[in-house]
Image (tube, helix red, strand yellow):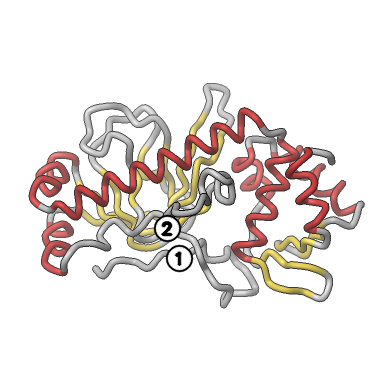
């Protein structure tokens, strides 16, 4: 398998399949100063620095799994046993509270791995992973991964780089959840989605990827009902407009002000 070029979330049933895809993951923390400081790097595909022979050696020790959309990859509280290298599709990683409420940590795409932080196993998963679309992954068991990491320095470095990147992203997300209002987080997310998937329109910028209100709620730490009401209010003010399954950003300047001040 050739290393995957970083690519953003393919639109879900979007009418704009040719939209450019600039990111390897979708996280609420994207766009924050901590994550985009000068010199900051995006996470590289895990196998990018390996030779062809080394890639074959790694994949020979793995087991391929295919999941349909909605299928569980690993569950919060279940034992760790290595990592999952994403070959195709997208994997949603999320935490579920005892009440059942969920917060999405990230959507990860081909080239990335999920299953940390205990990449070699030995402890329970602290969050869950599921297929957000039909996906294929390669499971590298903990014992095999440890053995490979001692033999292939580039793989060991890739694991460290990946864990550092994920740790920074989740740390920034925790800071946002603790210090920014839900209104600020929603405005930030809409502007970030416009940056990733925006298509110029006569009336503004169209987010050419389909997200349900529940998807947005899980990313900003709100309820679906709150997101629905907030988008309706923004539409009444002429800030956004719902177009079937897409969202048109009419007044990004207002969203930028909301992101900074929290004023609805």
Q: Residues within 10 Å of mark 2 (few under 14, many from 20)?
A: many
Q: Secondary structure at mark 2?
A: loop
Q: Is residue 56 left or right of residue 35?
A: left
Marks 1 and 2: CB-CB under 8 Å?
yes
The answer to which quarter of the image holds residue 141 is: top left
Look at mark 1 in the image and give the residue it sits on. 7
In which quadrant of the rendered image does the N terminus lie?
Answer: bottom left
Q: Secondary structure at mark 1?
A: loop
Q: Is residue 239 left or right of residue 144?
A: right
Q: Is residue 190 left or right of residue 166?
A: right
- The mark closer to the camera, 1 or 2, is 1
Point out the tag, 1 or 2, that comes first from the N-terminus.
1
Which residue is located at x 27 percent, y 44 percent?
A: 160
Residue 64, position as x, y percentages in the image: 24, 56
Look at mark 2 in the image and give the residue it sits on. 109
Residue 18, position as x, y percentages in the image: 57, 77
231 relative to 11, above or below: above
Which residue is located at x 16 percent, y 69 percent?
A: 52
Q: Residues within 10 Å of mark 1 (few under 14, many from 20)?
A: some
Which residue is located at x 91 percent, y 52 percent?
A: 237
> Furthest-top residue in view?
98
Q: Which mark is on residue 143?
A: none
In-front residue for pair 127/150: 150
């Amino acid at each position: 398998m050739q290393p995957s070029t970083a690519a953003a979330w393919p639109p879900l049933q979007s009418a704009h399949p040719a939209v450019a895809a600039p990111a390897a993951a979708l996280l609420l923390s994207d766009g924050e100063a901590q994550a985009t400081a000068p010199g900051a790097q995006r996470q590289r595909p895990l196998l990018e620095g390996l030779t062809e022979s080394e890639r074959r050696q790694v994949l020979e020790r793995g087991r391929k799994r295919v999941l349909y959309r909605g299928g569980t990859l690993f569950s919060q509280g279940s034992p760790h046993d290595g990592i999952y290298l994403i070959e195709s599709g997208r994997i949603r990683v999320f935490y579920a509270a005892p009440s059942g409420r969920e917060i999405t940590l990230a959507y990860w795409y081909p080239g990335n791995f999920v299953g940390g932080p205990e990449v070699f196993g030995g402890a329970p998963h602290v969050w869950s992973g599921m297929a957000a679309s039909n996906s294929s992954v390669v499971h590298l068991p903990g014992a095999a991964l440890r053995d490979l990491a001692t033999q292939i320095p580039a793989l060991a470095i890739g694991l460290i780089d990946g864990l550092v990147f994920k740790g920074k992203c989740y740390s920034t997300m925790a800071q946002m959840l603790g210090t920014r209002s839900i209104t600020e987080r929603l405005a930030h997310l809409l502007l970030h989605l416009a940056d990733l998937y925006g298509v110029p329109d006569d009336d503004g910028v169209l987010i050419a990827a389909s997200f349900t209100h529940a998807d947005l709620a899980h990313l900003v730490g709100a309820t679906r009902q709150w997101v629905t009401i907030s988008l309706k209010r923004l539409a009444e003010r002429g800030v956004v407009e719902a177009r079937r399954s897409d969202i048109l950003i009419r007044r990004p300047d207002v969203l930028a002000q909301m992101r900074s001040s929290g004023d609805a």
